[in-house]
Image (tube, helix red, strand yellow):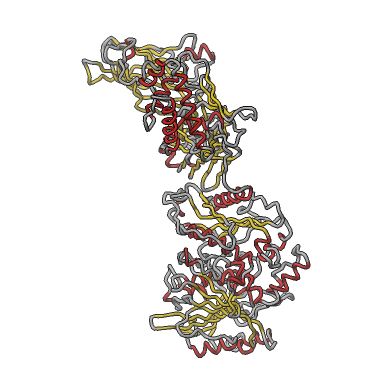
Amino acid sequence: MNNLYFYPKLTDALKDKCGFTVGKYVFTYSFQDKSFGLKQKGTSTIKLSDPLEIWKVETEGISISKTVSIAYPHLLFGPDGIACTDAAIGICIMWTNKTLTQTGCILPESDIETDTGRVCSFNYTFDPGLVQGDLELSVILYLKKKADSVQSGEEKLNNEEGVTIGEVETVVLDFNSVYMEFPIEEYNSPNEPLWWLYFSQWEDPKVDLFDRENICLYLNPHYAACPMVGEEIKNFDLLVDIMATTYMMIFQKINEDPEDLKATQQNLGLENNSICSIMHQFIESCPEPLHFESQEALLKSLHINIRKMLEEGDDQ
Amino acid sequence: MLDRLILKTDYAVSYGSVTLKSLQNDNIPELDLLVRESIQNSSDAALGMPGQSYNVNFTTGTFVPADFNSFLTDIETDLNDRFPSEFADFLEIRDTGTCGLTGCVRKSEIKSDDHGNFFKLIYDTGKRQTKANAGGNWGFGKSVYYRVGIGIVIFYSRIKTNAGFESRLIITLVEDEGKKNSDGTDATILNKIEPLSAGKAWWGIKEGDDLLPLYDEDFINAVLNVFGLAPFTGDKTGTSIIIPYIDSDKLLGDIVPADADIRDDIKENFTEVWTTTIADYLKLAIQKWYAPKLHNLQLRNFSNKKWLLATVNNVPIKKNDMLPFFRLVQELYNTAIAKTYGKDYISELFEDISCEPVNVRNYFDGMTTGYLSVIKISTDKLNGTQNLLSPYDYIGHFEADGGLNEPIVMCTRDPGMVIDYPIAGPWVKGITPPEDQNMFLFGFYMPIIEKRLRENLNVTEYAGMEFGEYLRRCEASDHMGWDDPAKMQLVAKIQKNCVRIIEEKSSGDGEKKIEATASKLANKLGKKLLPRIGYGKKSNAGGSGSGSGSGGAKIVNAVLDFTEQRMFGNRMEIDFTLTLMHSKKSADITVLIASEGGGWITPKSWQEDIGTKFPVEIEKLQITSISYSSDNSGENVDLICLPASPECSVDVASFSIQCAEESKEFSSVSVKASVFNLKISGTLSLFAIDKKYQFSVKID
């Protein structure tokens, strides 16, 4: 399907002629009143990752900054351009969040035009909850102020305020993580233990999802020994101990019906993302075999494997 | 007696008055400007010379005016009248270990790209420095020599030539050619002998059109003897600049501004220690502006920079003689410059100095522009047991003594001269002063001067340029600051980042410490222990692809191509070709309007949902060519459908333009063929009632 306009829009040739420089987006987030950068991968669709593994768009939101500069903005005007000589062109970033069907417009924080060029700087923060799943960002040119008089040769140009007259760049941010989260809740209380595990009444672990509804590890930061994550994991040895015991208890609960444990080990009839399915994958990904022959052997092999897995360098 | 040459008023002549004003700075004391410019000239002259240091000596003394005036043909009497006293003051600045005033001395020998040291210093004004990494830029710096005294300056130099060594001496006078006495009478020296003088004159040896320097060493010694100065001897090369008739009282009186907001006891202490004699103040000014290189023997450990041996009346200013604040400046400089060479310098004197890269994107390959060393230091740690004035007094910011202890961010280029000590402006704007009155906050930015700006920089005149050269071009002739040219924002960004770094440092320990949280372990553990999302899902690839009959690949049986579009105000003509394939014998082409939500609105839904006139209407359909399976060559026709006569036909096909239900605007085209593989070409003319909409066409 051809997209047609009754007026000239920004073409690649005109973009080159005008000397557009579109800086790369800088994505940051704020956590504990400090700003941290996000790594980006991809060009038209961008995947973001946080080296500190703190950030989720739902909980931290996201800040963007970008600079767009035009070396010869005057070439956008006149019969060979996209706006009448006396008009004014605005530059903005249109954002669309399809998941939440939200859209909006980001105006430049500074828009400096001198005889030698124009530079627009954008800085904008999406607060937590405002966007989710995806975010399309389009840098567009629009007619900010129409020309009072249309000069000869400019009749074909659009002269209606607010109308888009060029798309400079469009990128889509994909916030959907490729990683699952381990179901953890923080519970700060002097009256509770350092950690404990919650299991719901599973109907069938081959079907029941491995999520907070069915399994949840509670950590109590009231205690100094509570494992935590900052730049690195604090109380790492204790975390290994807690996780090994947690996995041990999950296996024990699955083993309330020995057929379920067998199904878990052999991947028999497991629903996607079910408790048994996730535990089967865990067995498969352990660098060393898990020993199911006795409880004490299992706990020991869990310790060894979990330590290795947590100590492994990040490959992403 | 020497020959003289007086520059006369003429077209495009360089006037003395212009030279005197060319330094573009009337804000800092003349002696400060003199120290800045003279050592910078010496630093430039030391480039490329062997050795790890260069020497600059300042000599103050007195001379007998009549003895000196006797060399100055035609103005001797006037000078004797002006200076009848037995003695007058002079100042000599002499550098050694430098190349001296080399280069040509005759006009006919001048090369257009480089006039050489001699010609530039003696005759040129505003001739840019061509030497890489040089301090000077504008060629106006030397004008300070003429401002310190009455405008007479003796330039004496010894250079190495292919034949051995050569001495050169020439005397220059630069004065304001329009200078008047308070009673309105002419105050110039030169107008008496040359009524149309341009305010510039030289004394040397005349040879044709040229006025050459004096080479005769006996004659030179006779001039030097007047001042009690020794000639260069042995294998020594260098330059001596002798400024007679300096007004010591005035020069010293300018240092503490008369209306300065300064406590009496501080003023008394400062003037007593530092402004009793010219030599006293020179010792302070040299530390102030050249602390980075002054007796800095460490430089050779991490850089190829020369250190400066500065002496006043032949007494060296050694590291231990420096005021603690200027020693700190040197340590800050060392810490930052070492980093620019990829090395670490840990200050033993001031261990709290930290150093951060100052990054700016888009100007270089690699973001680091230089390094910023920072320290927050208490008075006690800075001065130890010495009872000293506030650092702000020593750098001339008397008004800041007793104030908020405003942060200072210094910077330098290759010559190691502190550009300025700003307590206001972009280097420090936004930095919170220390809360404690006994604390100071200082920063020092050192650029990576060899780094090159990107070749593909938008501002092409700076593309590929060395950063040091760029900064040199950002300086005015007084070298007191860096200002980006209009098209660039590099220095501005560096300044902002320096402010940010210092602000972060001063407001905490400088590191972004994240308070650890337990709940954030969910991400980390998920990544390490759980499978990726989508694990275990069956892949759809290679599936049966069965389903409804229409689930397979869609068969294309009608193709509409737009070959050209022309716009006339609200009208558009689209040349098109429509091809029907396989068994398709009819097609409907409908105009659609884009909706804000991303979908398309048909004329029918527009009518139903919006109800206003459809924004685009078909004004005319013209068919110019028809072909079909048995006749691929095509037949030229001229069929036209207009709103007034919306239908037309030939024997193999009929065409019409149509309105959507309950709509008056023609918005679709219907094609009906009685043959297979119909192919038509023509022009569709559209009129936009509202041209802001994006539109498209669909074919059914």
Residue nearest the viewer, comparing A288 with A164: A288
**Residue A52, how many percent across, how many down?**
50, 38
Task: Please provide percent x and percent y for residue B486.
Answer: 54, 51
Q: Quadrant of the C terminus of chain A?
A: top left
- Is residue B337 or residue B556 the one in the foreground? B337
Q: Is residue B378 above or below residue A122?
A: below
View extreme (left): residue: B630
- Residue at x 55%, y 72% (from the top left corner): B10
- Please state which of residues B668 and B157 is positioned toward the viewer in this rendering: B157
Q: In the figure, is residue A132 to the left or right of B675?
A: right
Q: Residue B192's x, y, as percent?
A: 63, 81
* Residue nearest the viewer, comparing B556 with B51: B51
Identify whether B148 is placed above or below B655.
below
Vertical arrangement, residue B206 with respect to residue B363, above or below: below
Q: In which image quadrant can residue A218 be found?
A: top right
Q: Left or right of B237: which side holds A185? A: right
Count every numbered label the image shows and give the total.
Answer: 0
Is B94 positioned to the left or the right of B650 in the image? right
Residue A79 place in picture, x, y as percent: 47, 36
